[in-house]
Image: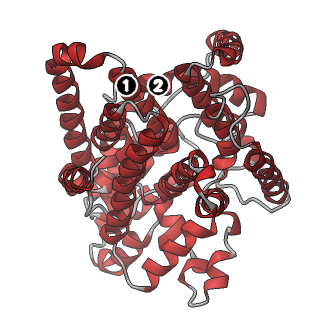
Amino acid sequence: MKKSFWLLWSILGLALVFLLDYSALGCEFVYDDLGIIVHNPYLHSRNLFTALSFNPFRSLVYFTYWVQWQLGASSQGFRIFNLLLHFLNGLLLLAFCGRLFEDKPLAGIFASLGLWLNPIFLESVNLISGRFDLMMSFFYLLGLICYLSYSRGWKFRVGFYLALILALLSKEIAVSLPLVCLVLSWREEKILSPKPIFFSILLVLVFIFLRFNWTIILAKTSEQMPGWGEYFLAQNGLFWFSIFKVLIPARLNFDYQLKIYFPLALAGLFFNIFFVGFLFFSLKKRKLFYRLILAGFLIYLPLALIPLADIFRETRIYLFALWIMLVFGLSLSWLGKERLKSILPLLGVIYLCFFSLCWERAQKWRSAESLWRDSVKKSPLKFRPVYNYANALRRKLKLKEAEQVYLWAERLSPSDLRVKTNLELIRRINQNPALLRELEERFKAEQEIP
């Protein structure tokens, strides 16, 4: 592609992402952002090593947080940085498609446009702690590009290992990179560049060993976490649910209320085993489409193997969703120019729907209050969004509304002392309005529950 095209496409992409997410940029710090950034004493230290010691295995992202905090950046500044990363990921996706599908330039155009327009990606942008996924995806794509260009010189060889290390220091799910490289390189009778695959797998194994020997502080107790087998089974169904949410990104929710249905999860497991087996068998045919689907499974696999309290969050599937956009772009490019012309109106409608959904979702991110209100509408029987919505109202000093929502939270969790404490505090304020001025700053500094 010519330099003039890259320049025009960059201007278009930058304008699109800022236009679509402009409404959400001014939202205050919410949810994990409070614990990771606002109330994190490590990050506030002037000593860089103290700041990075909070989690050295994600030190690259914490370094960017530390720099921005020391410079006095607001939540808007943090989100603008995230938005720029998202924009750059679109350009990298275009470059990666150009290396992988040299004879199909339209694949990268469709994929990068889908990345910039699909609202599911903005969840990782607007939640500032979604930067872990944004930066990991950036270096993941860079590593793939360097691997496909490995034979072009020492710069790409060094770049591959450096990108892998930086991706791992952004988020642990980058461990799948060497295996994805292995699958994608199965183009000829022999593996393309086996040496970097071997050494990168060794590097990943060392990283995993060190990571598992480091003390991990969890926001939830072990009693609140699902068992490994239960979690893994659920992810077999959520793999397909994630694909559905990426392709039809309607009714996005910051805090899902999902239950694990074991018959469906078990059926999903058996189907996935059969499907992955079919894909492995198809490697012999050296068809790129099958390799891309198998790579998608490998990208999702780390998400299925590490149990977390929330079985599904849209912010976690950024890289996987990006890969779906890549497959989507390739599928469209295979139609050929004549067929593409015939479905251009349909494609226009699809991208217009993405644009509309993006714009609508950004409105939900205007403030913590509007975000949690939307989540409560979609998960009315889940305690956490109801309680955090009440807290958001209280921080805005909307005490009458907050009291009603706290009563709602009390019905969901009658024994929760935090709800009872807040209700008692509101009653005291109603009896003594002067108390409000004393507590106003404390209200603003309060964290949301994880």
Q: Which of the 4 image quarters holds residue 111?
A: top left
Which numbered tag is attached to residue 303? none
State the residue position of label 2: 243
* Distance CA(mark 1)–CA(mark 2): 6 Å
Q: Amino acid at mark 1?
A: Leu
Left or right: residue 206 compared with residue 53: right
State the residue position of label 1: 247
Residue at 64%, 49% in the rendered image: 174
Q: Which of the 4 image quarters holds residue 211?
A: bottom right
Left or right: residue 203 compared with residue 65: right
Q: Amino acid at mark 2?
A: Ile
Element on which disc 2 rests: helix
Q: Which of the 4 image quarters holds residue 190?
A: top right
Residue 297, how many percent across, how many down?
62, 28
Element on which disc 1 rests: helix
Residue at 80%, 62% in the rendered image: 215
Residue 238 seen by the camera: no
Graded by Cα atoms within 10 Å as few (under 14), some (14 to 19) or many (20 or more), the crowding at tag 1 reads: some
Q: Height in image: 429 above or below 105?
A: below
